[in-house]
Image: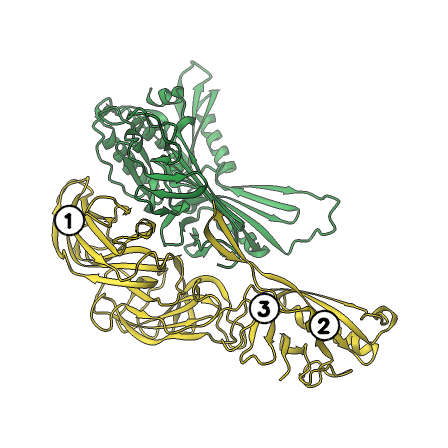
Chain colours: A yellow, B green
């Protein structure tokens, strides 16, 4: 099988490689068997997107990717000068469609590769020139060399739909039992499975579910505990310790250095004048704190789940001893000096890669078939699955955009060995542990150059 | 991330009620947070289609931003006060800064030398969109009728945001057409809106300054409820007369009180933070310079907390003690907020562009003794 490289724009495909291995003189470019185009492979292989890594004194702190510019060396056997120019014009038309319909698509499948990969083309510059020791196009040549210079997406992806990692799984809004609020992602492929590749997450509430705030996280490990559950009250405005509990995580932060820590606290009652704070340590309660959260109020006085913020685990990573224990000291205070009571029911410890919060806007989710979608990549028939700026939307009946939601934090991304953590509050911010919702997660495998069988 | 180093989300809720995320197409983001204002300012630049930029100029002013970092943490909040849009060689800027939709005029009578203040001239249409923004102007040698007329005239001039236009045609470039626009949005922290209204009090009763600040915020919210949230301010233990001169802004009145510190004479830190809540730290971190909040090693640009965990730059806050570990102080004065290795952080500036990030920590050295005395008075 010959290699297959082609460009598709506005419904027309120009084949850059003839399936016979040699360009067909004066042939139609829209079929692999007859195309007059060929790639001068001796000069070219796809260019990989270079990571733009930001360093701080030798240590990386952030990374992004930019588009790729590269030149594909082609040969065009026109048969006649007019046909050659017509094929050139056809390629110029097909490769420059982003201002008209959608970006043109570059399909790349080398000979022997099981699967193709698809890139988007954002800019195309096509320059013909004379082959070595031959007449130039300007002199009426019918065969020419063409430099196709394109600016394309940083990555290539699958076409139409990503990999399904979680397929219509029902999860419950609690950290215990089966099902609960955590589900491992299925196996995934691509170049970025250790760097975080984009996911699409859909949340379909069952009848009666009205999610006003949804937390979605890619979590390596989640621990649940009812230790310390009970009622605590104080009138102190400076704060007192309510209870402390210890979590022994299987994950060692040294082995997974991209992981951060976080606690989610569930209360069945929370006075309006109460606030809580978590103080996290690794050895003795209240000493050598690795994290002190802000004071957190509750949006509701009954049935609330509170996020106390994320923190890095560098101190545990560097100690290399007792590195898996996190002791969380839960403090409480009164905002006005009157007695403030809270009733803790459970605590969850997360070791996570990404964490985000989706807030409803003007339209409340009313239950099935309304769907909340956190969208990290394009997933549409006939188009490459490539990362987009992450957004969240509410879709009525799964088809109509009812509202644009506020997404804060990092949208869920795939990391090898991680899973989806979810939790939600109602449209009046009540946390109900008996509620369930159905989740589907699809993944966009990304490739810097070629895909092979991946 | 594609094109930008970190995943920021910048949801802007517009006066019309709908939301747009400014982070899509972002080219730069910066914010400053200070120990005497809280969230102080945000500025973002982004690419935008021309039609979106035109819409922004007309409808975005007064929008409310909640900037969220990669861990869903709020890193800044603010009110959109200035929008600049550049279309090739044409630029447009519209701002709330010169706007005033409530105007009073103080005047000195031409006859007899007496003085007075007009009642407020209001533009309720503007107030509904942007909130109440007041200005007090002074005129000499006039009378009450003329002063009222001047207030009305000023209102007509100032009630709407003002547009600044710059057009330039220059030779040297072969391309004059721009396919899109560049937008720059500047936000003020909600603390700055305390300058939008004035207050006064003739009471000479001596009251705890914390209690007074709580009352001032409640009073401010009675007119502008949407900027600063209801806030519980603890007592400071220091009392002062309730007297406030006519025409004093709420911000000045609050700062006059908090600058007195607490009952031990220690400084306070304050500002408007997450959820637009006014917070007072009593005392400020400057009073315990031995308690280090942030550490850094020369040659390592990262910031660590006292336990050695990295604190992302966008989460660094003022009212903190910052220490450079490699610069070992031979023997700092235990009560001195600044020494060779450690110093008090009064303001934090964070910025991120497509190809870099930076964090600036400013000390309180910019606050001269004269200025401090002027504030304590």
Residues at discs 3 and 2 both on one chain:
yes
Position of A280 with respect to A186 (left or right) is left
Q: Can you say whether A142 is above or below B240 in the image?
A: below
Q: Secondary structure at mark 1?
A: strand
Marks 3/2 in contact by CB < 8 Å: the verdict is: no
Residue A67 seen anywhere in this rendered image of the structure: yes
**Callout 2: chain:** A
Residue, disc 1: A242
Per the model, the C-alpha gap separating discs 1 and 3 is 55 Å
Residue occupying the point 61% across, 80% down? A111
Residue occupying the point 68% across, 76% down? A16
Per the model, the C-alpha gap separating discs 2 and 1 is 72 Å
Q: Position of residue A337 (x, y in %)?
A: 16, 40
State the mark number for residue A120: 3
Marks 1/3 in contact by CB < 8 Å: the verdict is: no
Instruction: Choose between B151 and B72: the one closer to the eye.
Output: B72
Residues at discs 2 and 1 both on one chain:
yes
Q: Position of residue A64 (x, y in %)?
A: 50, 56
Residue, disc 2: A74
Q: Position of residue B96 (x, y in %)?
A: 48, 40
**Callout 1: chain:** A
**Callout 3: chain:** A
Q: Nearer the viewer, mark 3 or mark 2?
A: 2
State the mark number for residue A392: none
Q: Secondary structure at mark 2?
A: strand
Which one is earlier in the sequence, the residue at label 1 or at label 3? Answer: 3
Q: Residues within 10 Å of mark 3 (few under 14, many from 20)?
A: many
Which one is earlier in the sequence, the residue at label 3 or at label 2? Answer: 2
Q: Secondary structure at mark 3?
A: strand
């Amino acid at each position: 099988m010959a290699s297959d490289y082609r460009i598709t724009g506005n419904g027309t495909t120009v084949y850059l490689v003839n399936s016979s291995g040699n360009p067909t003189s004066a042939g139609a470019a829209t079929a692999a068997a007859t195309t007059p185009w060929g790639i001068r492979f001796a000069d070219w292989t796809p260019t990989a997107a270079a990571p733009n890594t930001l360093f701080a004194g030798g240590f990386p702190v952030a990374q992004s990717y930019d588009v790729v510019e590269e030149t594909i060396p082609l040969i065009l056997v026109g048969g006649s000068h007019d046909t050659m120019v017509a094929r050139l014009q056809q390629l110029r038309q097909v490769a420059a469609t982003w201002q008209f319909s959608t970006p043109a698509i570059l399909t790349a499948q080398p000979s022997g590769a099981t699967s193709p990969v698809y890139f988007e083309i954002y800019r195309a510059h096509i320059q013909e020139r004379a082959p070595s020791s031959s007449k130039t196009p300007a002199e009426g040549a019918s065969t020419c060399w063409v430099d196709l210079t394109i600016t394309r997406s940083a990555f290539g992806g699958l076409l139409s739909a990503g990999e399904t990692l979680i397929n219509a799984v029902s999860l419950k809004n609690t950290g215990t039992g089966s099902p609960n609020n955590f589900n491992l992602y299925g196996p995934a492929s691509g170049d970025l499975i250790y760097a975080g590749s984009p996911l699409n997450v859909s949340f379909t509430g069952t009848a009666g579910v009205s999610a006003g705030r949804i937390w979605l996280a890619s979590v390596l490990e989640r621990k649940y505990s009812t230790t310390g559950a009970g009622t605590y009250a104080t009138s102190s405005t400076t704060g007192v310790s309510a209870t402390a509990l210890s979590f022994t995580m299987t994950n060692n932060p040294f082995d997974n250095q991209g992981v951060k820590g976080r606690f989610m606290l569930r209360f069945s009652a929370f006075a309006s004048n109460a606030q809580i704070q978590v103080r996290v340590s690794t050895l003795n309660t209240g000493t050598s704190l690795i994290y002190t959260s802000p004071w957190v109020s509750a949006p509701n006085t009954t049935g609330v789940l509170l996020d106390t913020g994320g923190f890095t685990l560098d101190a545990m990573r560097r100690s290399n001893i007792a590195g898996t224990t996190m002791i969380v000291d839960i403090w409480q205070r009164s905002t006005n000096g009157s007695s403030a009571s809270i009733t803790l029911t459970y605590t969850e410890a997360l070791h996570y890669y990404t964490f985000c919060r989706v807030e409803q806007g003007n339209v409340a989710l009313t239950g099935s078939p309304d769907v909340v979608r956190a969208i990290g990549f394009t997933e549409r028939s006939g188009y490459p699955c490539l990362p987009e700026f992450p957004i969240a939307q509410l879709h009525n009946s799964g088809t109509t955009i009812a509202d644009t939601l506020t997404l804060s934090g990092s949208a869920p991304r795939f990391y090898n060995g991680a899973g989806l953590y979810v939790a939600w509050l109602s449209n009046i911010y009540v946390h109900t542990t008996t509620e369930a919702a159905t989740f589907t997660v699809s993944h966009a495998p990304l490739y810097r150059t070629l895909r092979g069988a991946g | 991330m594609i094109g930008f180093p970190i995943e920021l989300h910048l949801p802007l809720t517009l006066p019309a009620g709908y939301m747009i995320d400014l982070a899509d197409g972002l080219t730069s983001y910066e914010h400053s947070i200070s120990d005497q204002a809280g969230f102080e300012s945000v500025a973002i630049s982004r690419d935008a289609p021309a039609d979106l930029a035109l819409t922004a100029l007309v409808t975005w002013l007064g929008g409310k931003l909640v900037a969220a970092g990669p861990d869903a943490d709020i890193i800044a909040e603010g009110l959109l006060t200035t929008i600049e849009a550049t279309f090739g060689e044409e630029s447009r800027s519209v701002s709330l800064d010169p706007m005033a939709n409530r105007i009073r005029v103080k005047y000195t009578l031409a006859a007899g030398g007496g003085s007075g203040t007009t009642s407020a001239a209001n533009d309720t249409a503007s107030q509904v969109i942007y909130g109440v923004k007041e200005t007090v102007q002074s005129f000499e040698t006039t009378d009450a009728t003329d002063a009222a007329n001047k207030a009305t005239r000023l209102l007509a001039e100032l009630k709407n945001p003002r547009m600044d236009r710059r057009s330039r045609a220059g030779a040297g470039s072969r391309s004059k057409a721009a396919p899109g626009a560049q937008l720059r949005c500047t936000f003020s922290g909600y603390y700055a809106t305390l300058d939008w209204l004035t207050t006064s009090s003739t009471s000479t009763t001596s009251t705890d300054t914390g209690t007074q600040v709580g009352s001032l915020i409640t009073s401010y919210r009675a007119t502008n409820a949407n900027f600063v949230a209801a806030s519980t301010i603890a007592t400071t233990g220091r009392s002062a007369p309730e007297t406030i001169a006519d025409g004093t802004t709420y911000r000045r009145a609050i700062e006059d009180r908090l600058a007195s510190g607490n009952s031990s004479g220690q400084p306070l830190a304050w500002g408007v933070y997450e959820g637009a809540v006014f917070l007072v730290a009593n005392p400020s971190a400057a009073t315990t310079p031995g308690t280090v909040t942030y550490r850094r090693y020369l040659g390592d640009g990262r910031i660590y907390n006292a336990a050695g965990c990295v604190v992302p730059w966008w989460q660094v806050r003022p009212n903190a003690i910052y220490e450079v570990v490699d610069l070992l102080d031979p023997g700092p004065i235990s009560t001195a907020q600044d020494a060779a290795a450690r110093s008090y952080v009064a303001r934090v500036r964070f910025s991120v562009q497509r190809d870099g990030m930076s964090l600036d920590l400013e000390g309180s050295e910019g606050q001269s003794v004269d200025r401090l005395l002027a504030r304590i008075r």
